[in-house]
Image (cartoon, helix red, strand yellow):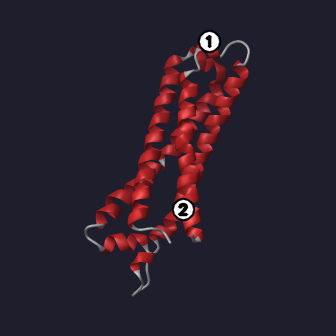
Amino acid sequence: MTEREWLTMLHGIGFGGAFLLAYTGGLEALWGLGPERTEGQGAGARVWRLRVALCGMALLAWLACLSGMYVVYPWYRAEPPPGADLAQFPRAYLLADPVLAVWQTLGADWKVHIANLCPILSTAVAAVVLRYGASLGELPQVRQALMALLTVAFGAAAVAGGLGALLARLAPVH
């Protein structure tokens, strides 16, 4: 595997995949953060683990997004010199074929935009949990809103990851 393929794998499977896996734990922890779980023995440790987990998820989302924008995406968008093998230039390769051009015009552009929702929403959820901590046990509507935001972040990451995987199959970054 080339260095670019390793970095692309780190971006998508490493950072993005880890975020998607961590989502279940974060959602379950928010779901189970009722009043009975935020009082008594072990409550402080439970809230601390939730804070660490959600901050870790937000960090993974930012790492996936930033590594995509500043490491992988420039390789994808590189302009080929005249007469170059377009297979080495994914964006140009897709645009050169009218059948595949839709993957660039809709798929790749939409992927980049929707992917940016994930770290923003994840950070918002982590910030609220950091601020309110154990008192979230008494605020079921806030917890439900946080779970909804986290689910939208998950959906954005899943769509971006799915489109990224499809694009990598059609026009890999070598």
Which comes sooner in the sequence, label 1 or label 2? 2
Q: Which mark is residue 36?
A: 1
| Residue type beneath disc 2 | Thr
The quarter of the displayed image where residue 136 is located: top right
Q: Where, quadrant-wise, is the N terminus in this rendering?
A: bottom right
Is label 2 in a helix, a strand or a loop? helix
Whether residue 67 appears in this view of the structure is no
Give the image quarter of residue 126: top right
Residue pictured at 45% horizontal, 76% vertical: 88
The relative height of residue 43 versus residue 65 in the rendered view (above or below) is above
Residue 59, x across and y down, in percent:
62, 45
In x, y percent, where is residue 49? Answer: 68, 30
Residue 62 picture location, percent across and down: 58, 49
Q: Viewed as shown, does residue 28 lie left or right of 95?
A: right
Q: In this rendered view, identify the residue nearer to me: 124 or 111.
A: 111
Say whether residue 94 is visible.
Answer: yes
> Image height check: is 141 above or below 86?
above
Q: Which residue is mark 2?
A: 8
Q: Residue at x 41, y 48 (%)?
A: 159
Marks 1/2: CA–CA distance: 44 Å
Q: Residues within 10 Å of mark 2 (few under 14, many from 20)?
A: many
Q: Label 1 sits on what residue type? A: Glu
Q: Are marks 1 and 2 in contact (CB under 8 Å)?
A: no
Relative to 59, 120 lies left or right: left
